[in-house]
Image (cartoon, rainbow, N blue to C red):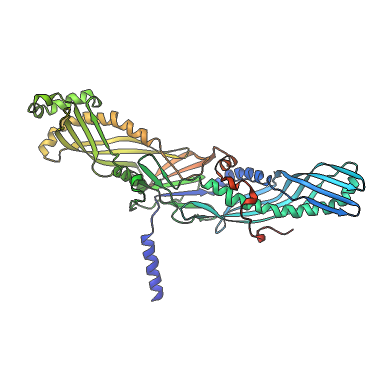
Amino acid sequence: MALFGALFLALLAGAHAELPGCKIRITSKALELVKQEGLRFLEQELETITIPDLRGREGHFYYNISEVKVTELQLTSSELHFQPEQELMLQITNASLGLRFRRQLLYWFFYDGGYINASAEGVSIHTGLQLSQDSTGRMKVSNVSCQASVSRMHVAFGGTFKKVYEFLSTFITSGMRFLLNQQICPVLHHAGMVLLNSLLDTVPVRSSVDELVGIDYSLLKDPVVSTSNLDMEFRGAFFPLAEGNWNFLNRAVEPQLQEEERMVYVAFSEFFFDSAMESYFRAGALQLSLVGDKVPHDLDMLLRATYFGSIVLLSPAVIDSPLKLELRAMDPPRCTIKPSGTSISVTASVTIALVPPDQPEVQLSSMIMDARFNAKMALRGKALRTQLDLRRFRIYSNQSALESLALIPLQAPLRTMLTIGVMPMLNERTWRGVQIPLPEGINFVHEVVTNHAGFLTIGADLHFAKGLREVIDKNRPAKARDPQASSAPPPSSTAAV
């Protein structure tokens, strides 16, 4: 009975789980590109390592090693891969670090000093980034695991005291190796928990699209990692800014991602587009009013001729009044996605009236318009853009079939007016696009759109328009500029010498 109850609760929870309107899959094909950019960033971070001065005495010799700086990272073997439960794993083996430091030697009254180059050989770094959602629905690096070790140091001493330095080199190199081992993991911990999180902060979660509507890209659960993919599920819902936390119930088909050939795949369900149109409808944006000179001249003449009988019965002061044509969506438009393409259907009221100055308007006719648009989706940079094309247009009267017959002569001119006067305004807005939840500096290229039953997918490759360093330096908080200011990792995360 207890087992049955648990299964029932699990099914009940699943039935009420929120469906994603948008999904993103990062495939293993993207990891080589990410690794190249990440290693450049890692090299720059390792150059921030600060090693304490190394002082000592052997007999009558006093030595001081100071101003130790990492100058370069040379890689022999590196691998970035997905690892379930560990999320993202970077392994560097048999690498070397170039070093430069200042040496000082005192023997009785003899002094020697200067700068010298060294190298840390056999450097191994194993670090993992665990990704999860935070309380705001944003993806974050929630944990950084790290093991790092340097197997040997090489210093080429020279000068008058070369033999002395060679005698002391065992003490100096052992001390430097120990200190270097202790510094690598704290730097990587800071880079993951602070710097990479500042990069993820540039991903939009709840942001405004324009002055009327916003979009919610909150993660619905932690990212799911397999050996070949990183999958993320987003709410993907628009909302009217005036209503704040209003949510549109998602009854659409859940988008599915099966492909793995491209670097990244983005899927959108019909809900994604329906929530946008519902939001603009609630915000009062789906209406258009043309008055006087805004009505095309030929259409103005045709409308006056069509309703001549009604106009001549009006008072002389009203007959020559400006004409008004108003279109207003009666219900939120709806999106339909099929393998053959994407379409948007809208039903609107069309009102024709005369607008005498300083007098109430005089309505001549009211009709219903049904229209269907083909919608072509495209991904440019990281903006989802839409191009609309009018495919079906019909007007009819909601009063009588006889009046609908009388409206037949208006079909063609109203369609032309919609095509020439309204469609450019719609496409100007939809082609501006909506940002996809990617960090700043990363764009989509070579995209391919595929329609399915109830959702569409876009496969693309990634392109770094900006380097990680540039974006992170721009967005990270001022208090995070010092690696020592961040919380240190647990002592066990750094490998012992």
**Quarter-of-image position of residue 300:** top left
Q: Nearer the viewer, residue 17 or 175?
A: 175
Could you say where residue 47 lies in the image, as x and y percent from the top left? 69, 44
Q: Nearer the viewer, residue 162 or 74?
A: 162
Q: Residue at x 38, y 65 (%)?
A: 11
The N terminus sits in image quarter: bottom left
- Please indicate whether residue 318 sits to the left or right of residue 279 in the image: left
Q: Is residue 66 above or below residue 130?
A: above
Q: Residue at x 36, y 51 (%)?
A: 245
Could you say where residue 83 lies in the image, as x and y percent from the top left? 57, 56
Q: Nearer the viewer, residue 214 or 156?
A: 214
Q: Is residue 3 above or below residue 288?
A: below
- Please indicate whether residue 469 sits to the left or right of residue 2 in the image: right
The C terminus sits in image quarter: bottom right
- Please indicate whether residue 32 sits to the left or right of residue 56 in the image: left
Q: Is residue 19 visible?
A: yes
**Quarter-of-image position of residue 156:** top right
Q: Is residue 90 visible?
A: no
Could you say where residue 350 lies in the image, as x and y percent from the top left? 20, 36
Q: Residue furthest left?
A: 313
Q: How many marks?
A: 0
**Quarter-of-image position of residue 100:** top right
Q: Nearer the viewer, residue 440 or 96?
A: 440
Could you say where residue 174 lies in the image, as x and y percent from the top left? 80, 54
Q: Residue furthest bottom?
A: 1
Q: Residue at x 15, y 41 (%)?
A: 398
